[in-house]
Image: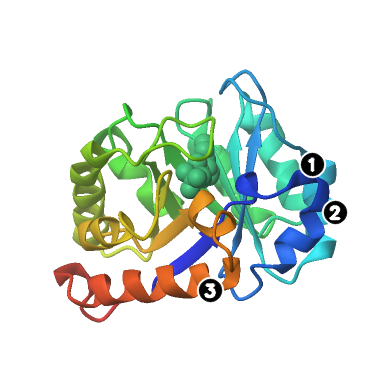
Amino acid sequence: MAQINPSILSADFARLAEEAKAVEGADWLHVDVMDNHFVPNLTLGVPIVESLRRATETPLDCHLMIEDPDRWAPQYVEAGAGSVTFHAEAAAAPVRLAREIRAKGARASMALKPATPIEPYEDLLPELDMLLIMTVEPGFGGQPFLDVMLPKIRRTRELISKHGLELWLQVDGGVSATTIERCAEAGADVFVAGSAVYGAKDPADAVRTLRSMAERSTASAPWACGH
Ligand SMILES: O=C(CO)[C@H](O)[C@H](O)COP(=O)(O)O
Ligand SMILES: [Fe+2]
């Protein structure tokens, strides 16, 4: 089953509750937390996640683009996130952090920037509920999709199959109607889309269109048998 997670980064921040409601029917609401240190942009933090939690029924998928996630990630679980993603490049103790996120009741996820390979993390995969492969350099919405990430998506899907894991494989950055099929064919099953959803006239309809495109492509992928 393909999941579509609209990114609130592309919404109007002065109308967050309305914008969150506009995509109810999506699987998760993707919330990009940026600290102006790990990435050169500043967005939102724990209090806004708490408010978003009350504003929508859609579960929150928090993508932490911050330094020191070992210290901050647990606070996002307490704020109501159902899934918390920290960056491999920023975490001091990724296994301990993933275990802490899970113990607090959320799904634990780790993200890789475009230049970070998956291979050193193969043995960590059973500790995670989701692996996020960035398909742009993190920091901003609306950037073009990096096609050069497709082999990494394929190799990660192979590792997930090899170990028989239930891990979800998320892609984030430049995912749209023109790129989602390539991502799905390569092995992604969770798709973040910011500008492609909030830039559309009808965001809820954009979610449905993206989901059916991804599902058509995954259905024919060899790794999706019995998925
Ligand atoms: O993590 C992100 C950027 O760092 C965003 O989730 C991502 O860029 C979504 O926006 P778009 O779909 O417009 O690329
Ligand atoms: Fe993101």
- The quarter of the displayed image where residue 89 is located: top left
- Ligand 2 within 8 Å of the CB at mark 1: no
Q: Residues within 10 Å of mark 2 (few under 14, many from 20)?
A: some
| Residue to which mark 2 is pinned | 51
Side of 193 relative to 216 (left or right): right
Mark number for residue 46?
1
Q: Secondary structure at mark 3?
A: helix
Q: Secondary structure at mark 1?
A: helix
- The quarter of the displayed image where residue 86 is located: top right
Mark-to-mark CA distance, 2 and 3:
25 Å
Side of 10 relative to 153 (left or right): right
Residue 204 visible in the displayed image = yes
Among numbered discs 2 and 3, the one appearing first in the sequence? 2
Residue 175 x %, y %:
40, 52
Q: Identify residue type, mark 2.
A: Ser
Residue 223 x %, y %:
19, 68
Whether residues under marks 1 and 2 lie with C-beta atoms below 8 angstroms apart, the answer is no
Among numbered discs 1 and 3, the one appearing first in the sequence? 1
Residue 129 visible in the displayed image = no
Q: Residues within 10 Å of mark 1 (few under 14, many from 20)?
A: some
Mark number for residue 205?
3
Side of 146 relative to 32 (left or right): left
Residue 28 x %, y %:
59, 64
Among numbered discs 1 and 2, the one appearing first in the sequence? 1
Mark number for residue 26?
none
Please state, as top left, top right, bottom left or bottom right, where the C terminus lies in the image.
bottom left
Mark-to-mark CA distance, 1 and 3:
29 Å
Please state, as top left, top right, bottom left or bottom right, where the N terminus lies in the image.
bottom left
Q: Identify residue type, mark 3.
A: Asp
Mark-to-mark CA distance, 1 and 2:
9 Å
Q: Residue furthest left?
A: 222
Picture residue at 37% right of the left edge, 38% below the top? 144
